[in-house]
Amino acid sequence: MNYDFKEIEAKWQQYWATNQTFKAQNNSDKPKYYVLDMFPYPSGAGLHVGHPLGYIASDIYARYKRHKGFNVLHPMGYDSFGLPAEQYAIQTGQHPANTTLVNIEGGVDKDGKEIEGYRKQLDRMGFSFDWSREVRTSNPSYYKWTQWVFIQLFNSWYNITSDKAEDIGALISIFEKEGNTNINAICDDDTAAFSAADWNQYSKKEQEEILLKYRLTYLADTEVNWVPALGTVLANDEIVNGVSERGGHPVVRKKMTQWSMRITAYAQRLLDGLDTIDWPQPLKDTQTNWIGRSEGAEVTFQIPNSEFEIPVFTTRPDTIFGVSFMTLAPEHELVEKITTPEQKDEVEAYVAATAKRSERDRMADVKTISGAFTGAYAQHPFSKEPIPIWIGDYVLAGYGTGAVMSVPCGDQRDHDFASHFNIPIPNIFKDVDVSEEAFADKATTVIANSDFLNDLSYKEAVRKAIDALEDLGQGRGKINYRIRDAVFSRQRYWGEPFPVYYADGMPQMIAAEHLPVKLPEVEKYLPTETGEPPLGNATHWAWDTLKNEVVSNDLIDHKTVFPLDLNTMPAWAGSSQYFNRYMDPHNDAEIFSQEAINYWEDVDLYIGGVEHATSHLLYARFWQKFMFDRGLVPKDEFAKKVINQGMITGTSAFVYREEGTNNVISKGLISNKKVMPIHTNVSFVNSSDELDIESFKEWRPEYKDANFVLEDGKYVVGREVEKMSKSKYNVVNPDAICEAYGADSLRLYEMFLGPLEQSKPWNTAGITGVHSFLKKLWRLYFDENGAKFTDATPTKENYKTLHKTIKKVEEDIENFSFNTSVSTFMICVNELSSQKCTSKEILESLAILVSPYAPHIAEELWEQLGHSTSIATIAFPKFQEQYLVESSKEYPISFNGKMRFTMELSLDLDKEAIEAAVMAHEKTQQQLQGRTPKKVIVVPGKIVNIVG
RNA sequence: GCUCGAGUGGUGGAAUUGGUAGACACGUUGGACUUAAAAUCCAAUGGACAUUAGUCCGUAUGGGUUCAAGUCCCAUCUCGAGUACCA
């Protein structure tokens, strides 16, 4: 009997599907365990070998937990809204819903090319997903609930006193009774105070405008990152180095009316929550930096003889006496108001010059110091000295108040600016020379030349300065966060439409019972000619408030029929609630039943890429906290533990064309010739980097007549590790691996490659190792005559090998070091086969141990051993110490008649042998002098060391 | 610049967290089986001397702590990730 992996794998995949082996129930006597993967965006390119890495790891863990007696929820779905399908639609006119469906379920694309689809690819790898719970973010039955959460956010405000989100109705009744003066709420900065009387006489529209300043999602004119090439707005985390993450298009700043999420209300809780969850430290660090909390003070500088004052944020209020000038961002609203007539031309020229420079230029050109003097002076709050007010582009309009108090002796940027413009640099630090550079070490700071702050340390001076500022009414302690409210509107087609129509210019929510508001059909997926988003092309995109349905735009009368919002939601909307929806995915009456959410509660293990640190993983935490505040979910963090799997990179291959010739030169012969590297398809290259020239020529006909310059009769390609991508021709398809070696081999090999968290290049060379392990495993059970296993009693050695393996594998899985347990299996099989073990008892246990890693072969072995049910929920074998160490008691040993010490006696040594070895050990004499030995390190036959 | 993380054979990587460094696998070399190939099996494989039995050197570099350091501490170098005029 041979190991026929193709037949075995097809058989068991069919079995699992037919029997719904992995269907999870929403209640059980067993403890629950929720293992989640980041669901994929189903792109047309299909899966490559890098994608399943995390899925394999989570699948091993999920299967292990089932063996350990847990009721495991292990779902999968698709993040099926997204830009690529829309780009494809723009190019081809194909409806994104169709392309998405084909990408998931397979079919034929518009060029007649067969697409296999994600589902088939995933099935082929033998994952134990509960497919009955599949969700797709672009299905109306799913995004109905995304829209629903949006409405809940709209109907909520953040109460600072209770430190949670509350119903907007509560806020309205407070307004009616006492206005807003006593309310401690998160709201827009420009919210004016009003009394109950004021409120009650406001028009409905005025009231709505005010409420919008408090709602957790609100409309605002925000400066956004507009990408003309894509016709859309991107969030800050979708921009890399001033260009769009996807496509690398230039980004410009533009003001637009957009939905925003008041995530800033949760800044502190998002920080605090990090201490309560088991997430990777780098991920926590990234979120911490992104939230960017800094403690300091807000200080108000008055401009004498004017109505203006300038608030600044500083982390160093202790250096207030070192202020020798102030700097405003060029965009600061006061710039034009305070500039003196003499300075007007210079300032205007400078402001115009900075406005012209793109964000990218400004970032690239950090070194150049530039600025202009406004001619105006503010007054120092304590010394009352005049402080010149400058503008400079090193101050950012978007952070703090867009203005700084400049302390050149304590901040290097201020120091550079002062030196450049010959502004005085007063020193306020004791015994420090600040003439060359600023002094910023808080720990050793001692303040001088600072009136009432003299001789104080940093900490003392900060407190005293803030107290004094508060007494003057010119400042207070303040915590500033870098994180901004998240813009939530996208000018795209393929996303969730907003359940919002506009009456009298004010947004109105569509009642929950009329959801979902489905995406309308459009002729064109591009923005309209008037610059409106793609939904502006829809002819049926108006809301009839009588019929409660979407109707033709022609019917808009602003009395009963109103225009709908033309924007759609960003990609992170759907992914911020999917982990909860999996708990009850077919519920059409509720987002999930309370029964389901209270049973599953939260995700126990979440595996996915670190690239979502400041997007999905932050926004999802925000939504969860909001849902928690509103009593919808029992936990305020959605995932207890996160693991970031590393990326599997590709190993690209290059051929080298000599410039200006028809020569394609082998790598070793380039020396100093001028060559152009050209990507070649990695499938034409064998493991010793030799190129199959004929295949290459066929693939790239333009090189049909090229002259290939060989070394030793071979063409050797160059190699480089790059991200796996279609355009780099370095993609390795898991289907090809499954075809050649089987899914079990692929699963084992991806784990064997190295630690889960580590990024590593794909290299098929070693896969024969794990494949031959599976064959050896098979041969432990069968030979050419059939089954080998017997009822023979296992030997001591058999038990020892087995229990060694149980212990190690269990530890490895619990620690997520799946790579080393593959080695452990190999050692186990080698030992058992050299022991000629045929004991059914041992072989049964071994099959269960292997089952999470290589489930197909395990199921087959299990069946062949005579069992009629799936191995999936069979209890994991119990580790028993006794088989490893016969007597593990502490053993006293005398030495030189006086000293006594203890040690663990291993199987391999008896007391006499150890005593003899200790006596014989050459280092014993020196090392034990004057010490009481505590421990002897022993390896078979040898004393390694003696610990005093 | 700042914040994390990492540097171990020809290669991917182990090392019970301070206790035999290089498990396991790939690759390479030699051998067995075979008409041959594939497959399979066996042996060797960090380096240098000795080739018997051994000795010395070895975990980026330089120091330190310790009976004992890949592991801990200090400094330096290199690579990777995140972030960046954040006041």
Image (cartoon, coloured by chain):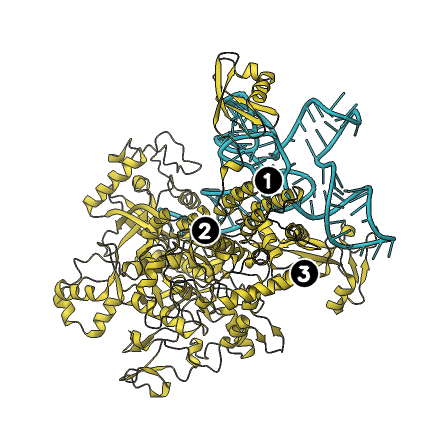
Q: How crowded is mark 2: few (under 14 residues within 10 Å), some or many (20 or more)?
A: some
Q: Is residue A564 left or right of residue A739?
A: left
Q: Mark 3 lies on which chain?
A: A
Point out which mark residue A795 bears.
1
- Where disc 3 sits, the SS reads helix
Q: Distance between the residues labelled 1 and 3?
A: 37 Å
The mark nearer the N terminus, 2 or 1, is 2
Q: Name the spot of residue A537 as percent of width and height, x first.
A: 44, 81
Q: What residue type is labelled 3?
A: Ala
Going from N to C along the chain, the mark reached first, 1 or 3, is 3
Q: Position of residue A593 (x, y in %)?
A: 32, 66
Identify the mark at residue A740; answer none if there is no mark: 3
Q: Hey, what amino acid is under mark 1?
A: Thr
Please tell me which residue lies in front, A624 or A726.
Answer: A624
Question: Is residue A947 positioned above or below A882 on the image?
Answer: above
**x 27%, y 45%: residue:** A380
Q: Which of marks 1 and 3 is in front?
A: 1
Residue at the far bottom: name it.
Answer: A554
Q: Which residue is drawn at the image coordinates 25% and 42% (left, top)?
A: A466
Circle 1 packing at 10 Å, graded few (<14), some (14-19), many (20+), is: few
In the rendering, what colour is chain B? Answer: cyan
Proximity of marks 2 and 3: CB atoms separated by less than 8 Å: no
Q: Are marks 2 and 1 on the same chain?
A: yes
Task: Name the element at disc 2.
Answer: loop
Chain appearing in yellow on the rendered image: A
Q: Where is residue A131 in the image (x, y as percent from the top left)?
A: 47, 66
Residue matched to label 2: A68
